Structures are given as C-alpha cells and as structure tokens.
Amino acid sequence: MPKKPLIVDPSLYDLDKPIATIEDIRKYNRQRYEMEQLTAVVYDDFEAKKCVGYKDMTPEEFWIRGHMPDFPLTPGVVLCEIAAQLASYFMTKHDMFDGAVMGFAGLDEVKFRGMVRPGDRAVVQSEMLKWRKILITAKFMCVVNDEIVCEGVLKGVPLPIEK
C-alpha cells in the first residue's frame, strides 16, 4: 500500500537550516516556558499557505515524569498543540487575523498513528484551508522518521490581545 502523501514534499526544506528559531517564533507566538512547543520553522510558503516546523523532544519535557514514567510517550494533545503553535506562527506572521493573535478553537478528524518519544524530532506540516477574520481551518501532519504519527484538522480564532 502506498504511503499517504505529505502536505509538503520534504525536498523543499532542510531540517538543518531553520528559517525561524525559537527567538524568531517568540515574536509571533506568546507561549513561554514549558508551553513553548515549537523548536524551529523550516518552511514558510505564503502563496501555497503551507509551513513546516519541528519540535525536538528532549529528556526534560514537562510531561515525561507523569506520562508513563517507565515508558515516556508524548501525549497526543501535545502533538496537536505543536501543530496549533505552527499554524499560529504562520497566521500571525502573515497578519491573516488583522493584528490579532491566534487561539486554539478546536480539532476535527484527529488520528494518532504512532509514538513520539524523548529523542525524537516531530516534524509538523500544516496547510491553511480556510481563513476569515473570525476563524481559520488548517490541516496538519506530524511526522517522525518519515512516518505519519498524527494528523488532523485544527481551528483557530483571534484572541482579543495584542501581539
């Protein structure tokens, strides 16, 4: 059975050459400390409405102590949060909410297909499907070692706070 096509062909980006580091991401995303879930952005195509980033799972992740101490496994909700932060970065950077910051509003069609463990790099690909001043919809895929481990559709709304 052929593999499901990815949102962005990996030949279009280089994981070793981020175009946005955590310092750049902080200009657009407000999460800090243990809630910063995006390590870097490696692809940003406004015309195609697609972007790619990643999260390096370290042995110091906040969830490790309690999410199965003898077998640390990234919670699925954390994978969805990484995707939401990537979409938020893209939407805010390109001012698609007229100056507002994006808030997480919902998930649809989410499927978990594999495990993400400390030491893994979760590469997240996203494509904005619809955007209006009150709601965005984006599909996403999380990939580890060339395998899709999570996918779905997320929704975001503008939050009434300044950047």
Image (cartoon, grey):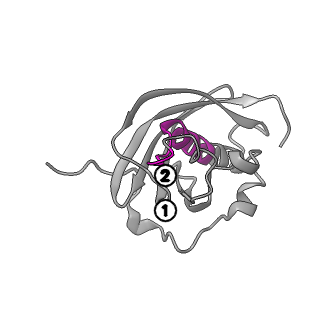
Q: Seen from this angle, which residue lies furthest right?
A: 162
For the point 40% across and 42% down, the residue is 150
Residue denoted by label 1: 119
Task: Residue 114: give x, y in percent of width and height.
Answer: 35, 46
Mark 2 vs 1, N-terminal side: 1
Query: Is residue 54 highlighted in magenta?
Result: no
For the point 57% across and 60% down, the residue is 58
**Where is 41 relative to 158, above or below?**
below
Q: Is residue 45 left or right of residue 26?
A: left
**What is the count of numbered marks?**
2
Residue denoted by label 2: 124
Q: Quadrant of residue 163?
A: top right
Q: Is residue 143 left or right of residue 28?
A: left
Q: Quadrant of residue 81?
A: top right
Q: Is residue 163 left or right of residue 93?
A: right
Q: Amino acid at mark 1?
A: Gly
At numbered mark 2, what does the secondary structure look like: helix, strand or loop?
strand
In the picture, the disc for residue 63 is: none
- Spatial CA span between label 2 and label 1: 16 Å
Task: Please rate how many residues cluster around mark 1, counting C-alpha atoms within 10 Å: few if below 14, some from 14 to 19, many from 20.
Answer: few
Q: Amino acid at mark 2?
A: Val
Query: Is residue 71 highlighted in magenta?
Result: yes
Magenta-tinted stretch: 69-87
